[in-house]
Image (cartoon, grey):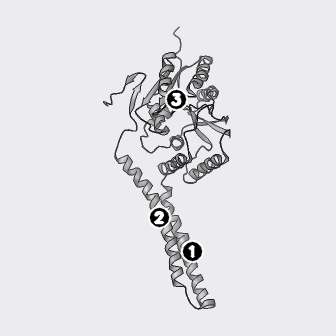
């Protein structure tokens, strides 16, 4: 009797300057794969232009265990692009996206697979706690998800990251979305499909330093909002009505003050206040419009999202 072919699960790990944790990651993933023999596993390590020995360690792991594959990008394109590059090269029936820093426990993957076998297409991990993070980062992260939800009618998974299992059809859907300004968290929500939440406690980094600072997080937040919805452009409409109302009230106040109290109008002060008020609104709106125009410019160039230097020892020729 012919033995039934095992399903292949790809574990996708984007990495940038993670030389301190890759061996620890290997140990935990190897144990996980050896204990779950009902599935075949592939680990795809994506080197996003690291400046340390991350790429050399990936090559060592490939020589040590052929289940570990690597994809070396030509330079640092950013985590969002590294993820879509990995999805383009994944071969699995399902793909698990996980960070290299081990803040997301690989031991949660079997539970994700269990829900996947029950028919869920997107099994995402939701953080119950976030050890090792400042209160400011926790607060700003919480507010970001609330603001993003306020701008769209699509349900956003709050307090979740990229750690999730995606069925192959979800992966294929994401691969069709080739925009340059990417926000995967929004895309995971946009594609829909049957979703399942798995709760876990997020650990602090085992080694190394976080590559995210507040400037990068702000840029990511702006990308997430402006690439997902055009609602900010409606701010001009939303501001027009209350601004006109405030202007009417102000003029009524000035006229009443002139008639009942001073019998004169301080025209210079009134003009300066009005100029400052409307100039501030215009600068805000021009900034929002500029963000969208900049994205149109980037998309119009039609450049590839990334360039690959090497995949499992084979140099990329970029012929296609």
Q: Nearer the viewer, mark 2 or mark 3?
A: 2
Crowding near the residue tagged with mark 3, few <14, some 14–19, many ≥20 C-alpha atoms within 10 Å: many
Instruction: Place residue 100 in its image quadrant.
Output: top right
Q: Could you tell me residue 140's position as x and y percent?
A: 62, 50
Does 29 sit left or right of 234 as displayed?
Answer: right
- Of residues 100 and 154, which is closer to you in this image? 100
Residue extending farthest front: 52
* Gap between marks 2 and 1 measured at Cα: 19 Å
Does 234 sit left or right of 206 as displayed?
Answer: left
Q: Could you tell me residue 123's position as x and y percent?
A: 59, 34
> Looking at the figure, which quarter contains the C terminus?
top left
The secondary structure type at the circle numbered 1 is helix
Say which residue label 2 marks: 283
Q: Could you tell me residue 194's position as x and y percent?
A: 57, 36
Residue at horizontal 39%, vertical 29%?
A: 309
Residue at horizontal 40%, vertical 52%?
A: 294
Say which residue label 1 marks: 246
Say which residue label 3 marks: 12
In the rendered structure, are the residues bearing label 2 and label 3 in contact, judged by CB atoms less than 8 Å apart?
no
- Of labels 3 and 1, earlier in sequence is 3
Residue at horizontal 35%, vertical 41%?
A: 303
């Amino acid at each position: 009797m012919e033995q039934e072919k095992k399903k292949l699960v790809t574990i996708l790990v984007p990495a940038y300057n993670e030389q301190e944790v890759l061996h620890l990651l290997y140990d935990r993933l190897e144990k996980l794969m050896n204990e779950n023999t009902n599935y075949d596993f592939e680990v795809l390590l994506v080197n996003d232009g690291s400046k340390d020995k991350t790429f050399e360690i990936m090559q060592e792991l490939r020589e040590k265990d052929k289940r570990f594959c690597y994809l070396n990008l030509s330079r640092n394109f950013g985590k969002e692009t590294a993820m879509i590059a990995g999805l383009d090269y994944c071969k699995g029936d399902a793909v698990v996206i996980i960070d290299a820093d081990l803040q997301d426990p690989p031991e949660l993957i079997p539970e994700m697979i269990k829900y996947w076998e029950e028919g869920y297409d997107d099994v995402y991990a939701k953080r119950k706690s976030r050890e090792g993070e400042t209160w400011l980062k926790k607060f700003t992260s919480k507010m970001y998800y609330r603001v993003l939800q306020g701008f769209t009618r699509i349900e956003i998974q709050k307090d979740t990251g990229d750690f999730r299992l995606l069925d192959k059809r979800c992966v294929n859907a994401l691969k069709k979305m080739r925009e340059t300004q990417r926000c995967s968290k929004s895309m995971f929500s946009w594609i829909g499909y049957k979703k399942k939440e798995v709760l876990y406690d997020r650990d602090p980094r085992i080694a190394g330093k976080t590559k995210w600072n507040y400037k990068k997080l702000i840029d990511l937040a702006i990308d997430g909002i402006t690439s997902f919805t055009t609602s900010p452009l409606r701010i001009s409409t939303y501001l027009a009505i209350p601004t006109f109302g405030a202007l009417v009230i102000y003029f009524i106040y000035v006229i009443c003050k002139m008639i009942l109290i001073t019998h004169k109008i301080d025209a210079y002060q009134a003009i300066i206040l009005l100029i400052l008020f409307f100039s501030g609104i215009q600068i805000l709106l021009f900034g929002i419009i500029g963000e969208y125009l900049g994205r149109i410019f980037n998309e119009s160039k039609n450049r590839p999202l990334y360039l690959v230097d090497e995949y499992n020892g084979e140099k990329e020729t970029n012929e296609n």
